[in-house]
Image (cartoon, rainbow, N blue to C red):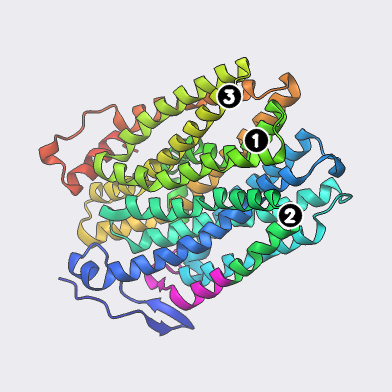
Amino acid sequence: MTSPSPAPVASRGGRWIEHWDPEDEAFWNETGEKTARRNLFFSVLSEHIGFSIWTLWSVMVLFMGPEYGLTPADKFTIVSMATLVGAIVRVPYTFAVAVFGGRMWTVVSASLLLVPTVAAFTVMEPGTSFGTFLVCAMLAGVGGGNFASSMTNINAFFPLRKKGWALGLNAGGGNIGVPVVQLVGLAVIGASGGPRLLLGIYIPFIVIAAALAWLRMDSISSVRNDTGAAKDAARDPHTWIMSFLYIGTFGSFIGYSFAFGLVLQTQFGRTPLQAAYVTFIGPLLGSLIRPVGGALADRFGGAKITLWNYVGMAAATAVIVVASMQKSLPLFTTAFIALFVLSGLGNGSTFKMIPGIFHAKALAKGLDGEEAAAYGRRLSGASMGLIGAVGALGGLGINLAFRQSFLTVGSGTGAFVAFLAFYGLCFVVTWAVYLRRPAVTETDATPATEAKSQLSYAEV
């Protein structure tokens, strides 16, 4: 049995853990769990603020009345560019954990949030050009990268049996940055404050998050300098299958988070304050339920939860189409919030599938014990960044679809019909790749047989 590791030691200029074996229950109970939970807490804090800065412009556009000279299409373009950059930077952010270590990169990524915040604080006033606003929104995209590096880092800290809960909590705590910035924006609007007040509130919190990461987080040595894992993950078909499924869940969550307020303003004539009163509810509930999705996946299997979640998302979208055609604001808002909740649940279940798939592949290669767990952590950690990046591009697609739908038919109905068809396709892919073969019986459902069973549904 592996002996418990001593506390993280200072080496190479920081807090590095030289030995890490969370699958060893003795190690986990004596040393591992406490360290993992501490790193999870401060990772959530940094990622939470990152999400707030990333989605900052979903609130900023509500402040931008006629005096700014922007059309609804201009505003959708602004939030689309923030989404795009947030998706792209997730790829290098994933690699950065292996290059710099989880602790150091959390410090750097948190500190970088000052750039878009200070830039927006400087230019946020009528008369500023559309191009300048566009550049500031693109800078805010760096906040989207924090998710990828945070998930890659936290994935290495927890054993397979707890990954659904841990990754769900990490991501959910980050996702909740979306409704928080919207709530802060609501308070600022309600107090007749300007957008600079909203920006000024976040600057000190960014500094605090970076300082706490420096003081309280650790890096795992075995994760460092393993950039080759990204190449292996990129060559695996399941990375791209899961990326497609994550477009449907997280792409929906982040895309709707950016667009909800604009849709209410543009299609239903809501004022900024009226829109702000509602827009935070969906992202808040979707964020809170994400850990539940992970926990349900831990218990029942990620693919099963994901499959039926897509059924629910399709049903909610169908209701939205009807409400949009009938111009029923209460029905539209209720169904939209339900769609947010389901997207959050699906975020948790899809991400739980990832470590299970790669652990299953390790078992199929004849690996076992810590060797199999290390293989699964290595590839699942690398794939999460790629999957997160592609999934975030779904948010770009949603905002571009809304932009085109409003330009073409004057409402979001056409976009919702397209989303409904996409959720149907996600259902088919989930069933065909991961669930169409019979599952093992409950009496056989040990962690090893569950992983092997999952691989049988996803043979390369």
Q: What element carries label 1?
A: helix
Figure check: 366 above or below 276: below
Picture quarter containing residue 270?
Answer: top right
Residue under label 3: 416
- Could you tell me how far apart the alpha carbons at marks 1 and 3 are, in whole angstroms? 11 Å
Q: Nearer the viewer, mark 1 or mark 2?
A: 2
Q: Earlier in the sequence, mark 2 or mark 3?
A: 2
Q: Can residue 92 be seen?
A: no
- Check if residue 175 falls in the magenta segment: no
Q: Which amino acid does label 3 sit on?
A: Phe
Relative to 174, is 127 on the left or the right? right
Q: Which of marks 1 and 2 is nearer the N terminus?
A: 2
- Span highlighted in magenta in the image: 208-227
Where residue 365 appears, as percent x and y from the top left, is 25, 50
Q: Is mark 3 on a helix, strand or loop?
A: helix
Residue under label 2: 193
Figure check: 298 above or below 140: above
Identify the residue at horizontal 66%, vertical 37% (top origin): 274
Q: Can residue 238 be seen?
A: yes
Q: Which mark, by number, is residue 399?
A: 1
Of the pair 23 and 29, the residue shown nearer to us:
29
Classify 10 Å Cα crowding around label 3: few (below 14), some (14-19), many (20 and above): many
Q: Which amino acid does label 2 sit on?
A: Gly
Kindly report the secondary structure that dominates the magenta region of the rendered protein: helix
